[in-house]
Image (cartoon, grey):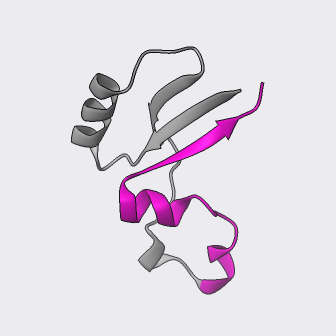
Amino acid sequence: MRHLVIVARDRPELFENLTRRLPSSPSLQVVMDRRHTAPATARTPERRGTDEDAPALWVQGFIIVRAGE
């Protein structure tokens, strides 16, 4: 099973920290978020439910997801 640690684009220092601290492994990869979306505060209520991962990225700066193989 493979996991991705996705780091918010506005948190480059967190990305660098995680890439240094997490072990290098084929089953775990740290990547920057490449989506081009508006922040949660700028979203309309009808769009909120379409992007489940976004709140964690904005609040915590990262999210861990299981990647398909």
At x 57% / y 82%, what residue is drawn?
Answer: 44
Front-most of residues 57 and 27: 27
Q: Residue 41, relative to residue 61: is it above or below?
A: below
Does 1 sit left or right of 39 as displayed?
Answer: right
**How many labels sit on residues?**
0
**Magenta residue check for 52:** yes
For the C terminus, the quadrant is: top right
Residue ranking furthest to the right: 69
At x 58% / y 58%, what residue is drawn?
Answer: 53
Question: Residue 15's x, y, as percent?
Answer: 32, 36
Question: Residue 41's x, y, as percent?
Answer: 43, 78
Does 21 sit left or right of 64 as displayed?
Answer: left
At x 43% / y 15%, what residue is drawn?
Answer: 24
Could you say which quadrant of the image residue 7 lies in? top left
Front-most of residues 21 and 61: 21
Does 68 sit left or right of 24 as displayed?
Answer: right
At x 57% / y 14%, what residue is drawn?
Answer: 26
Task: Tell me the magenta residue range.
Answer: 45-69
Q: Residue 18, relative to residue 59: is it above or below?
A: above
Front-most of residues 6 and 66: 66
Q: Residue 42, relative to residue 10: is it above or below?
A: below
**Magenta residue check for 2:** no
